[in-house]
Image (cartoon, rainbow, N blue to C red):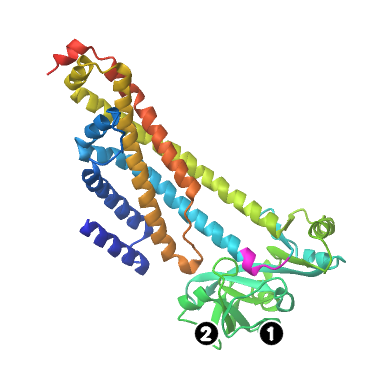
Amino acid sequence: MLFLVAGGGITFLLFKAGVVPGAIALVIAVAGGVLLVSRWWKARESEWPPEKPSRQAGRLARENTARNTSRTAVTAAAMMIGVALVVFMGVFVNGFKNSFVDAIDNSVTSDLIVQSESFSPIPDKAVATAAANQDVQTSTGIKFATARINQGGTDFVSGVDPAAFGKVYTFDWKQGGSDALLTGLQKDQALIEENFSKSHNDLKAGDTFTITSIDGNKAKLTVAGVYKDPVLMTGITISNTAFDQFAPGNTDPGVLLIDFRDGVGTQEGKAAVEKALSDYPVAKVRTNAEYLDNFKSQVDGFLSILYVLLVFTVVISLFGIVNTLALSVFERTREIGMLRAVGMTRRQLRRIIRYESVITSIIGGILGVGVGLAFGWIVTKGLADQGATFTVPVGQLIICLIVAAVAGMLAAIMPARRAARLDVLEALQYE
């Protein structure tokens, strides 16, 4: 156990340092989990599952499962690996979902978010069209492009209207920046996200750097301020004037943020903006709440795919459990005959086999949940600077354990039927 803990700690440190990639760390975690199953089950074989004194089926099933702990561990490992992968992805995806939702709630102060429903951006004229509506106080867009930084790696560049953007978005300033500075942002100035600063030699206010567009256009920028937003406004933020010169082919915004005048209701203002933007079919108008609901539904759709993968994993693990139970029944043919001879009914025998199967499946499910949560915590901590947060999807964990238990019951059907149909006399004579 000491070696497993030490190995896990070393793996975490190497992952944090970037020496061990995530995939390799997962393999190490799963391998350690398989060893842990065997050790844990060996130590707990006399304690689990808890049984009532009046019920002997649980005791017999427990003892049968504990006869060969290594075989039980290997069988449970198939379920454990599948559940661990699903739980890990659930933790990972839910963590980023919550981070995105928090970023919208804490930073975006507009009443509406207008987003393109296709891969095409929203026409730049839509910004002025929305602003001309009598219910709208502020209408501003965010333009997006990618750039090579100082002849090195690439990152995102966002173009905003300095005079309007501060009215619909709240910056979390870390160094040098302010709302007044944003309003007066010059063409040769840039606001940079904290992670961008760290990844480029800790750039700070007053430092300069060069960006190059995919068309070869270059711009030398001076850092005016550093802010924190690893989810929405990543990379670099510059004025629309600088952006249009840097990326003249990307002058249309990808997102519009619209704020209403005082006294205008949300649905009333939304209807007015939808009517004003009716000539731009790619523009989908949503309130902040509707935008988040749409985002959550997309993430939940991805999670439903994980549940399908869980089903496939369970089906695969069923073969292992069925094979183990069938082998166990074959090895205990004479013992089964003796139990039947002293009065055990077929129903009681089937119950014992089912208990064995459920025990093995639940062991795999519980250990899978533990390994998945542990690895999810390691990865989210390693990506904390990118906005990842550790979130425990309680509902998903319960579903995984229920599926594991049901899978155990299904896996026991054929072996239990074979055991119950054994001829008592032939079983007693079996060598």
| Numbered label tally | 2
Q: Is residue 214 left or right of residue 32?
A: right
Look at the image and tell me whether residue 120 can be seen. no
Q: Is residue 277 left or right of residue 308?
A: right
Q: Residue furthest right?
A: 134
Query: Which residue appears at 36% of the width and 60% of the height?
Result: 21
Give whichever of 117, 372 is nearer the camera. Answer: 372
Give whichever of 137, 51 is nearer the camera. Answer: 51
Query: Which residue appears at 26% of the width and 40% of the height?
Result: 74
When the figure is inspected, residue 88 is found, relative to residue 20, above or below; the finding is above
* Image quadrant in which you'd find residue 50: top left
Q: Secondary structure at mark 1?
A: helix
The amino acid sitting under disc 2 is Lys
Residue 29 at what x, y percent from top left? Answer: 31, 54
Specify the quadrant that holds the N terminus.
bottom left
The residue singled out by tag 2 in the image is 204
The amino acid sitting under disc 1 is Ala
Q: Which mark is residue 180?
A: 1
Specify the quadrant that holds the C terminus.
top left
Q: Secondary structure at mark 2?
A: loop
Q: Residue furthest bottom?
A: 206
* Image quadrant in which you'd find residue 172: bottom right
* Distance from the alpha carbon under mark 2 to that under mark 1: 18 Å
Look at the image and tell me whether residue 115 can be seen. yes
Query: Which residue appears at 48% of the width and 71% of the height?
Result: 153
When the figure is inspected, residue 243 is found, relative to residue 293, above or below; the finding is below
Residue 335 at what x, y percent from top left? Answer: 18, 22
The part of the chain drawn in magenta is: 104-110
Residue 298 at what x, y percent from top left? Answer: 60, 49
When the figure is inspected, residue 350 is found, relative to residue 215, above or below; the finding is above
- State which tag comes first along the sequence, 2 or 1: 1
